[in-house]
Image (cartoon, rainbow, N blue to C red):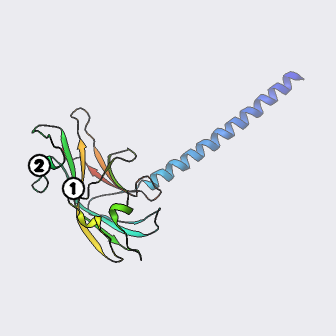
């Protein structure tokens, strides 16, 4: 009798464990597909409509061009790296001609109200985008219906052994509204 009860108990536990495992796997698949949906990537020339999770206003962003460089006529490397020497692996990501259009009914200041970062593909947050050198309009209030355009800059430390394949420009970083532009590395 004990052997039979033990055997039944064993099978029931297996069934419960298998059911739990299936439920966990199903939940995991749903979570993965949710994460994939949340990771829709935009590319140069595309416009995203974004709603601020924190402040509730909406805006559009268009990234028109970018390059990974250590040689820009507009932005000398010494502005970013005080001791830069020819041949260093220091670069910056120049995301040029970015347009932010305020589609909400409230004014906001992009530099204060929009979390913006650049990271290597797959990383969570990354480097804060420098708006002070090329996108000074983003330091001021943007009125409803107003659009501003400028250059965003992020400094990068590149290594020859393991160069990033892609960089991600993120708006609303680490929120449910996170929106990502995938920018392939232009330095090989």
Q: Is residue 188 something that shows in the picture?
A: no
Residue 67 at x, y percent in the picture: 19, 52
Give the foreground label among 2 and 1: 2
Residue found farthest to the right: 1
Labels in figure, total: 2
| First along the sequence among labels 2 and 1 | 1
Residue 124 screen position, x and y as percent: 40, 46
Tell me the number on the disc at residue 66.
1
Which residue is tagged 2? 71
Lateral position of residue 181 relative to residue 39, left or right: left
Q: Is residue 176 visible?
A: yes
Q: Tell me what residue is drawn at x 47 percent, y 68 percent.
A: 56
Nearer-the-camera pick, 11 or 145: 145
Tell me if label 2 and label 1 are in contact, CB under 8 Å: no
Residue 83 point in image, percent of width and height: 14, 40
Mark 2 to mark 1: distance in Å? Answer: 13 Å
Residue at screen point 34% across, 64% down: 110
| Residue 168 x/y as whole percent | 32, 50
- Front residue of 138/11: it is 138
């Amino acid at each position: 009798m004990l052997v039979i009860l033990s055997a039944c108990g064993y099978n029931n536990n297996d069934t419960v464990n298998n059911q739990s495992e299936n439920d966990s796997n199903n939940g995991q698949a749903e979570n993965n597909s949710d994460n994939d949906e949340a990771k829709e990537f935009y590319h140069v020339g595309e416009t995203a409509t974004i709603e601020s999770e924190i402040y509730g206003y909406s805006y559009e962003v268009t990234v028109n061009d970018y390059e990974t460089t250590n040689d820009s006529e507009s932005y000398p490397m010494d502005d970013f790296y005080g001791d830069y020497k020819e041949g260093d692996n220091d670069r910056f990501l120049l995301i040029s001609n970015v347009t932010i259009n305020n589609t909400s009914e409230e004014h906001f200041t992009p530099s204060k109200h929009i979390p913006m970062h650049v990271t290597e593909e797959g990383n969570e947050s990354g480097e804060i985008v420098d708006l002070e050198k090329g996108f000074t309009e983003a330091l001021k209030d943007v009125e409803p219906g107003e659009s501003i355009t400028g250059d965003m800059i992020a400094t990068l430390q590149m290594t020859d052994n393991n160069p990033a394949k892609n960089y991600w420009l993120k708006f609303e970083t680490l929120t449910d509204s996170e929106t990502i532009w995938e920018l392939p590395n232009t330095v090989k």
